[in-house]
Image: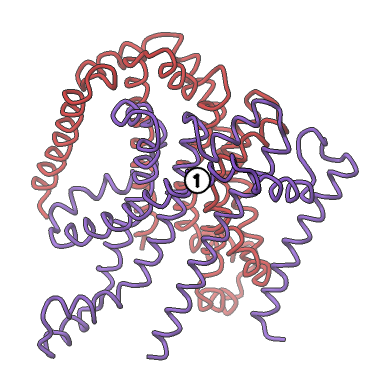
Chain colours: A purple, B red
Amino acid sequence: MTRSTRILRARWGVSLGLIVLLEVACRTGLVPPLAVLPPSEMAAAMVELLTTEEVLANVAATFSTVAVAFLGAVLIGFAVGVALHGIPRLRRAIDPLLASYYSVPIFVFYPLLVALFGLGALPLIAIGFLAALPAMLIATLLGLDRVPPVLRRVARMHRLGPARTAALVILPAALPNLFQGIKLSLAYAFIGVIAGEFILSGGGLGYAIAYAYESFDNRTMYGLMLFVLLSAVVSNTLLSAWESRLQRRRGRG
Amino acid sequence: MSRRQGVLDGTLILLAILAVWQGLYQYAGSAALTPPWATVRYAVDLLGTPNFWGHATQTLSAFAWSVAISAVLGIALGLWFGAFRFAGDVAEPMLASLYTIPKVTLYPVMLLLFGLGPSAKIAFGVIHGLIPVVLFTLGAVKNIRPVLLRTARSLRLSPIQTARFVLVPAVLPEIASGLRVGFSLCLLGVLIGEMFASQRGIGFLIINGINSHNVKLTTAVTLIVIVFAVGANSALLALDRRLHHRG
């Protein structure tokens, strides 16, 4: 058995072990049963909830909000990153802003966004977008920084035009950083939207969880919570798998 | 870049921010936010009131506890995972994916486990701040250059000397970066906690301002939070850079 399969097995073992541990702790009353549902019941609740019309509508609302915020952040973050990379002086001036951006709890802007965009999906899209944008921007800058100068020289030597240089030389060289940015953007957009719904909005999965908490409906709360956490982990894992496949193919090429 | 140009650019950026702020005010009106100068004046007034400090003390003490717990627990876990390579390889991607989940959904669990009050806020701050500290520490220990350890061995340093003169200086810069990220996330966690369910604290002040349409209060408190967060982060960033660039 190779080391990597052993690690993979250990990872599954630890995860399953923790779930079983929580199950036992709940069933034996070690963890107060009113506070935490056993995992098996969480899963059952999740499956039940996902067949109801209302929950599916919430899922659709949240996912589409996240998708718009994420795509907007990736496209605009990339474009601004490329532009900023071309203007070093502006970049140096903006650098301190980027460095402290994530230290500001972005949710303090939510009231302003509501006042600007009204209630509904728009302020949520804005908060997801604002949470995700700098991650993509910073990753684009780093990716472009790391393109080895020799590659640019080779492109010039082969007399590639700007478009072909970008497509054939610069993009592939910056790809690992860009992918990191895409992954972080998705995570941050999801976190931003769910938290926005949770604190202040009147719809979506985040709101449904907060509502279930306030009406002491633990079963719904834990079912939805499990679904949100699984969605985040699964989407992140899928992106990682795609990333390593791309990198393997590049390694062969 | 000359120093003067840097100062000039910084001033221009600050002016641009103020112009955007004023522009937003012109566009959205006083139902959305207050203009820069009025906000600064109100914020200064607010900083002189005991009521504000009552809330601020609550937030700062919960924040201090969650930073302390995240730091101690995070460094200990990170060192442990770093020292046992197999455990570290198993744990690292799991922690990274915990980092990307929307932890706000877990806040009700904290409330159910710890009850309403400061402990739930502290616990919520810790689940935000702990993971980056663990990940950075783990990375630092994992990436110690083997030649450093071999040198320590060939100089016959005792384990304590190795730790004092080799290990600690080698991992300190990375741990400082982790603590900086953890610091910001703890603040985020505590504030979200207060915004969602609390009767005290800065987060509560903001939510209360929103619910009672007290735009002046909300904007001023937001400004205070931003200045605090950016100021603390800049100080930690400067420290971080000094540690990284030390000979």
What is the three-letter code of the residue carrying label 1? Answer: Gly
Q: Quadrant of residue B235?
A: top left
Which residue position is annotated with label 1?
B182
Please report the residue visible at 13 percent of the width from the left and 90 percent of the height from the top. Answer: A158
Image position, residue B40 (x, y; %): 25, 19
Please report the residue visible at 69 percent of the width from the left and 48 percent of the height from the top. Answer: A46
Query: Is residue A234 or residue B207 the one in the foreground?
Result: A234
Please report the residue visible at 39 percent of the width from the left and 67 percent of the height from the top. Answer: A179
The answer to whether residue A212 is left or right of residue A123 is: right
Helix, strand or loop at mark 1 = helix
Report the chain holding disc 1.
B
Image position, residue A28 (x, y; %): 90, 43
Residue at the far right in the pictured view: A28
Report the quarter where the C terminus of chain B lies. Answer: bottom left
Image position, residue B35 (x, y; %): 21, 20
Q: Quadrant of residue A126?
A: top left
